Image (spheres, grey):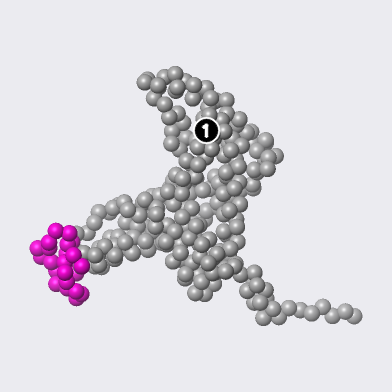
Amino acid sequence: MVEIPLSTPQDERNRVMENRPELGRYLGASMTEAFEDTTLAVAMDETRIANAERDAYGASSSSFWGPNPYDPVTQHSEWMQHRSTQKQLPYMSEADWQKSEHYREGIKWEETMTPVRAGIYAEEYDKRKERTSIMERGGGGARSVLGFGAGIVGSLPDPVNFIPFGGAVRGGSTTARVGAAVFEGAASTALADAMVMPNRAKMGKDFKLADYMSDVFMGAAVGGLFGYGGCQASRLACGSDPPAIRCTDPPKGCRGCV
């Protein structure tokens, strides 16, 4: 009788460690994944698709920036030519797309699917799959904490972080101003997700409620960081050290943070 050696728990841990990506790759994947779910990344992707289609076909199927860049009154001939060219783009039927090399299960077919658009969708889908694999194998313990921090850094360039959704709290305490910033960050992220999530879903990303809640939480964290940093800058402008008295008549640039 041949005995088959069973793996021990230590063998399993060693196997996991062998397949574990380096910390730098894990943090880079976490940062990139967070950035890819920002409004800026959506705009960049749609711009890339529009430019690639114009280079290949002379017109773009993208409706993100408007389907026709010409004014129908002052540029009527150009407007008509673009409209004609746009109708003649090599749109792929759903059946043709499913048979192509660009097909990926999870990506949603759309009527404006050209080979260029399908290729970029597939490319981004493959990159996301690789990042997901790195993040799943590279997390755990202190790494997950660092990964969350990398995600916050990756989401910083999103323009929604700079929208004063709820209005600034002037002359309030540190707690009040940071609390308002947390609310602004969460609210603006929830608003941005209404545009980002449908775009990413059609490119094959599977969004769940947990993803939405994580985005809002991260937006709140970024807002809190901005709020606290602004409050500390105001303290410096006041020329006072904590615990400080309230600036009843603050100089210009001092927002009276205490």
Where's the N terminus, which quadrant?
A: bottom right
Residue visible at 47% across and 69% down in the picture: 146
Image position, residue 244 (x, y; %)? 17, 73
Q: Nearer the viewer, residue 214 or 102?
A: 102
Q: Is residue 66 left or right of residue 106?
A: left
Count residues near mark 1 (Cα–Cα under 10 Å), then give few for <14, some for 14-19, many for 20+. Answer: some
Q: Is residue 30 left or right of residue 160?
A: right
Is residue 241 found inside the magenta-colored segment of the image? yes
The amino acid beneath tag 1 is: Arg
Q: Under tag 1, what secondary structure?
A: helix
Residue located beneath label 1 in the image: 54
Image position, residue 69 (x, y; %)? 43, 29
Residue visible at 29% across and 62% down in the picture: 227
Dominant SS in magenta = loop
When the figure is inspected, residue 15 is found, relative to residue 73, above or below; the finding is below
Q: Quadrant of residue 238?
A: bottom left
When the figure is inspected, residue 42 is found, relative to residue 31, above or below; the finding is above
In this rendering, does residue 223 appear at all? yes
Question: Residue extending furthest top?
Answer: 77
Is residue 76 found inside the magenta-colored segment of the image? no
Residue visible at 32% across and 56% down in the picture: 184
Residue visible at 24% across and 65% down in the picture: 233
Provide the residue span drawn in magenta: 236-258
Image position, residue 186 (x, y; %)? 36, 57
When the figure is inspected, residue 87 is found, relative to residue 55, above or below; the finding is above
Where's the C terminus, which quadrant?
A: bottom left
Image position, residue 190 (x, y; %)? 40, 53
Q: Nearer the viewer, residue 111 or 145?
A: 145
